[in-house]
Image (spheres, coloured by chain):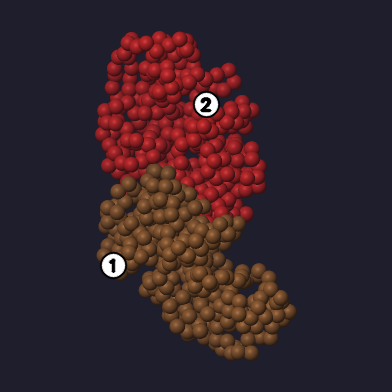
Chain colours: A red, B brown
Amino acid sequence: MPANRQILLDNRPSGPASESNFKLVMVETPVLGEGQVLVRNHYLSLDPYMRGRMNDAKSYALPQALGQVMVGATAGEVVESRSAYYQVGDTVVGRGGWQEYCVMDSNAQHGLRKVDTSAIGLSQYLGAVGMPGITAWLGLVKICEIRTGETVVVSAASGAVGSAVAALARARGCRVVGIAGGPDKCRYAMQELGFDACIDYKPHQDAASLSRALAQACSQGIDSYFENVGGMVQNAVLPLMNMHGRIAVCGLVAGYDGTPIPMANPQLILTSRLKLQGFTVSEYTELWPGALKELSTLAISGKLRPRESIAQGIATAPRAFLGLLKGHNFGKQLVKLV
Amino acid sequence: MPANRQILLDNRPSGPASESNFKLVMVETPVLGEGQVLVRNHYLSLDPYMRGRMNDAKSYALPQALGQVMVGATAGEVVESRSAYYQVGDTVVGRGGWQEYCVMDSNAQHGLRKVDTSAIGLSQYLGAVGMPGITAWLGLVKICEIRTGETVVVSAASGAVGSAVAALARARGCRVVGIAGGPDKCRYAMQELGFDACIDYKPHQDAASLSRALAQACSQGIDSYFENVGGMVQNAVLPLMNMHGRIAVCGLVAGYDGTPIPMANPQLILTSRLKLQGFTVSEYTELWPGALKELSTLAISGKLRPRESIAQGIATAPRAFLGLLKGHNFGKQLVKLV
């Protein structure tokens, strides 16, 4: 029975989340029951949606229970098995949470599944070929219904979802314009992720200024906007949306902490006949297989191979997560646990 | 050649519209060309969208040109014809504008069409069985895709669109809750239009207070919201929307004058996975025949026979229009010209 270090949600944030909301504990891994497997988590995925679950409020996910292991997607290796389907040594992904080991039922309860690491690295199944990749696919294909020749804008462009948005939109013949924080991320987005342009929002004091900069990169207006951040960026994008534009509302990081940030001019929804639709990756599971197939192909061909930002050791997870919320990560944020 | 009194847009409002933006002129009706008809307008329809056209800004309709007759839908009678298709005495609807007479080409350029007034009054073709009715139909059927048993909320409930929303939603087995200004309109909405409940927004100082009142009338939450007003009412409705709720954004009267009113908490689009979609009646003309058929049936059966607010004489049109923007009308606002 290996010792297992876990991060629990100890108390809920009032205002910005902080490290004091979390608590590191050490427990023994339990004896396996029939049909269970013990997985050693190699990678923990950190994602913005987790911030919403820390609140005890209606969000797109149920609140995370206090005193329980933080939920989260993990990739790892089966180290003990009482399931006929899983063998020791199998590489798997699932929702193992913020901990070094997890016990999982071999039925689909926690979304446990084997993955093939011969051509795609294990950690990629938490990013490009995992939940962030599928999120990008659903937003572009299902919500925005993007078409060849359109201009697609995505915020948080250099992140896990943003990099998949770029690859998927380019594969469909779209012009892809990113919005990211800082010249390094913007350069990376253009040079490595294939964005046609990427606007640094940081030098802009207000939405009007950012909007002018964005307009120069979107000479044909914006047909689809993949919304990851909200706030000032959203208010900069809205006036540039073309008639019948679509906005996939996937994340609103800017409003996760404390007071919501208003939409300055909802009138534009009417005048430009926009569609805005909130969605999460859990909505359309019937579309996942097709999405994963395309994402795998793009990953293997090198057209989708985003950078990863890797923190080392379970104890670093809270700090890495808070950094993610502030945009300190560069690419997909992971915690390496081995 | 009868004399024709017209209302022109003389100058654009800065802030609230006023009577001084309009100008009454008298002209002679021109000699008809081949294929043209002269229509004596009996009724002029006044509608909130006209306010948007008074601005020289991107709106859902092109700006109204200065010095030209205000555009608008009219119902009248052919008094002179050089078209084989139209006879003197035919009752017609079209976009004749704010004037007593109009010359129209008998082709469909101005949407001229004959209407049968044997079972439906001429003025109803400007309301229940006209553009407002079709607007209600498109919002409910095409945008909101309402289903039996759902709760539908509509703002400006006692108006032309609101009354059609009530009849169409009831015909589909929905609970219909209105929002209107003042106890008279609310009573009328429930007693004559068939609303299950109608909330008076006027006693409420803020969105939170209105939201609490609305929640009492919507014990199962709100599945679809037909948005006619925006502002405080919108901010009161949004927190009550059920998961996967739909909002048909048809009008935002509250923001037509001056500064736009922000959406306080766009976060709800994500947390409740809402769809908001702006639309206008001109979007889906292929659906009009089916809509008009249902609306006619409802009108003839008495299930859709809303009240009309009738001003007398073309000179009263500006004042009646400004009253409409302030909610002074009671039912469909018309100007009677004969």
Calculate the distance from the C-alpha at mark 2 to the C-alpha at mark 1. 61 Å
The residue identified by callout 1 is: B183
Chain letter of the residue beneath label 2 in the structure image: A
Residue at the image point whose x is 31% and y is 13% from the top: A30
Q: Which label lies toward us, 2 or 1?
A: 1
Q: Amino acid at mark 1?
A: Pro
Chain letter of the residue beneath label 1 in the structure image: B
Residue B308 position in % (x across, y down) = 42, 73
Dividing the picture into quarters, in which one does residue B311 lie? bottom left
Decide if residue B251 is on the left or right side of residue A168: left
Dividing the picture into quarters, in which one does residue B304 lie? bottom left
Please state which of residues B155 and B117 is positioned toward the viewer in this rendering: B117
- Label 1 neighbour load within 10 Å: few <14, some 14-19, many 20+: some
The residue identified by callout 2 is: A124
Residue A176 position in % (x across, y down) = 60, 44
Decide if residue B76 is on the left or right side of residue A30: right
